[in-house]
Amino acid sequence: MSFIVVLIGSVTFLHYSTHESPYYYFVFYGELYFLPIVIAGFWFGIRAALAASLAVTVCYAPYVAMHWQGFSLVDLDRILSMALYNLTAVIIGILKEREAIANEKLLKTESLATMGKSLAAAAHDIKAPLVVIGGFARQLRKKFSDYDPNNEKLDIIIEETEHLEKMMHNMLDFSKPLMLEFCEKNINKIVEESRVIVTEKAQKKSVMIDYNLSSEIPATSIDSTRIKEAIINLLLNAVEASPEGETVTLRTSYSESSVIIDVIDRGRGLPTELRKQVFDPFFTTKKEGTGLGLAIVKKIVDAHKGSLELIDNSPKGIIFRIKLPRV
Ligand SMILES: Nc1ncnc2c1ncn2[C@@H]1O[C@H](COP(=O)(O)OP(=O)(O)O)[C@@H](O)[C@H]1O
Ligand SMILES: [Mg+2]
């Protein structure tokens, strides 16, 4: 940063100290002011570029005022130069910001792909012994009488292996490439089928699931099994986040370009600082969570060229919105 300050200072010094020199010197010095602005933008982004262009304007403006010739062409040229300094800062800043976002996306995609491969290998190796442990534990549990003192420990083994099996299933699901089979479907039907699957779990928590389905929803080309999986994952999260007695709503609607599925809850919501992380694999705030649910939903929706959004359900809870392109 000090290099840029020195650069602006030096160019300013050249301007003010050589006012007796020929005109083309000033033209050259004027061009030199672009240097710190461009460097600041490339090194530190839009804020630095704007700070540099502002500093240049502040340094240059008195010079322009001191040598004012009453709106001559030279004066106008100098004013235009000042405007150009600031415009350059904005353009370079915006381009740099865009590049940073694209790089971050690429890095994330690459690291997700690497993570997917390692996950698939690990999950594959762990799954087989897990099935054996769970199977034997269930067999033993059946052999023991209901009053056997070992039952409690066996139940824990069964429960924990089931949790691990679920996690392995999710890990394989997340890491495998999606082979989608597209077929034209009515989204309302998929939403209804998803609700049936989650109903029992919701009832256990005394959470209701209701509908608000658009009757004129257009047919969409989707892989219905995968979209159902995505809706179920969102529904499970919504039920888990809801307090007893609350209602989760499934809403469908459409716009000119997309079909929209909203999973709406009135639960505890999510602090703003955590919202960026919820789609990252293994991010969970639950004791028994795998943190793969939303990562899988995102993967499914992306594969459909759709979008997944988290929206505030003011005053309470969250809306997860899936948008799928219309055929
Ligand atoms: N409807 C919701 N309301 C509040 N928080 C949510 C909701 N859905 C997801 N989250 C947050 O996102 C995290 C990640 O969700 P997910 O990927 O499904 O993993 P898991 O459910 O296994 O924790 C959850 O642990 C929770 O903190
Ligand atoms: Mg989940």
Image (cartoon, grey):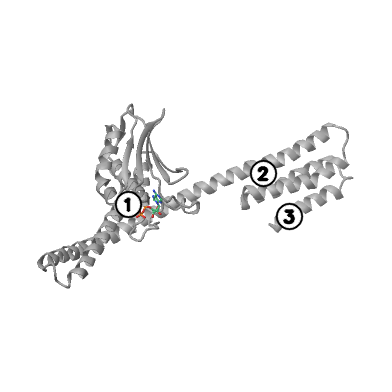
User: Which residue type does callout 3 highlight?
Assistant: Val
Q: Position of residue 1 (x, y in %)?
A: 68, 57
Q: Which quadrant is home to the C terminus?
A: top left
Residue at the extreme front: 245
Depth check: give the residue in front, 124 or 307. Answer: 307
Establish if 78 lies above or below 115: above
Depth check: give the residue in front, 14 or 75. Answer: 75
At horizontal 52% and vertical 47% (from top left) the residue drawn is 101
Q: Is residue 285 left or right of residue 124?
A: right
The reply to whether the C-beta atoms of the residues labelled 1 and 2 are less than 8 Å apart is no
Q: CA distance from mark 1 to mark 3?
A: 50 Å
Q: Which mark sits nearer the N-terminus, 3 or 2?
A: 3
Mark 1 vs mark 3: in front = 1
- SS of the residue at dot 1? helix
Establish if 3 lies above or below 186: below
Label 3: how many residues lie within 10 Å, few (<14), some (14-19) or many (20+)?
some
Q: CA distance from mark 3 to mark 2?
A: 15 Å
Q: Position of residue 278 (x, y in %)?
A: 42, 52
Residue at numbered disc 3: 5
Residue at numbered disc 1: 174
At horizontal 31% and vertical 44% (from top left) the residue drawn is 208
Q: Which mark sits nearer the N-terminus, 1 or 2?
A: 2
Q: Which mark is residue 152?
A: none
